[in-house]
Image (cartoon, helix red, strand yellow):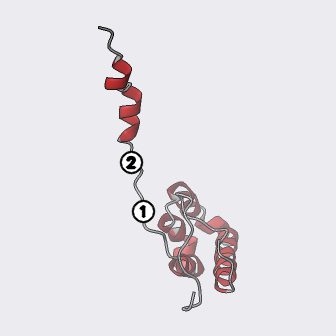
Amino acid sequence: MNEDKSIIDPPDETIDNLFIIEPISPPKKRLLALFLAGFPLTGLLGIDRFYLGQQQLGVFKLLTLGGLGLWWFIDATLLLLDALMYSFGRDKGFRKDAAGQELKGGLSMYR
């Protein structure tokens, strides 16, 4: 009797791939990221980058004190523009967290 073992026993690599589960983190809040970037103490120390999950950029921003203020200003401005554009109807923002997820919420309570 000729048995086809490939039908009975699937290859090992498919079994290993079945159990790979990516952790899903809840989306970060756009308004909190804006507050952390806009407030000078937390923005210059890179706390906003740590909140968004970008630890390497957070450490670099911390060590350079927000790029001597320039990086801090650019980050706060981009987050403000992102929140405004989202509030005015744009579905996707251009700022994302480290996992590439969209930030949640904007400046408007109705959206």
The quarter of the rendered structure image containing the N terminus is top left
Q: Position of residue 88 (x, y in %)?
A: 69, 86
The image quarter containing residue 13 is: top left
Q: Is residue 20 above or below residue 9?
A: below
> The residue tagged with tag 2: helix, strand or loop?
loop
Residue sitting farthest toward the left: 1
Count residues near mark 1 (Cα–Cα under 10 Å), then give few for <14, some for 14-19, many for 20+: few
Tell me which amino acid carries mark 1. Ser
| Residue in front for this viewpoint, 42 or 3 | 3
Q: Which residue is mark 2?
A: 21
Residue sitting farthest toward the front: 1
Instruction: Specify whether 65 is left or right of 9.
Output: right
Q: Is residue 13 above or below residue 76?
A: above
| Residue in front for this viewpoint, 60 or 89 | 89
Q: Is residue 6 above or below residue 101?
A: above
Quote the CA–CA distance across marks 1 and 2.
12 Å
Tell me which amino acid carries mark 2. Ile
Residue sitting farthest toward the top: 1
Number of numbered discs visible in the structure rendering: 2
Q: Position of residue 20 (x, y in %)?
A: 39, 43
| Residue in front for this viewpoint, 3 or 89 | 3
**Is there any visible trace of residue 9 in the rendered image?**
no
The quarter of the rendered structure image containing the C terminus is bottom right
**Is there any visible trace of residue 36 in the rendered image?**
yes
Instruction: Specify whether 59 is left or right of 90.
Output: left
Between circles 1 and 2, the one closer to the viewer is: 2
Q: Which residue is mark 1?
A: 25
Q: Look at the numbered discs 1 and 2 and tell me whether their residues touch, using CB distance below 8 Å.
A: no
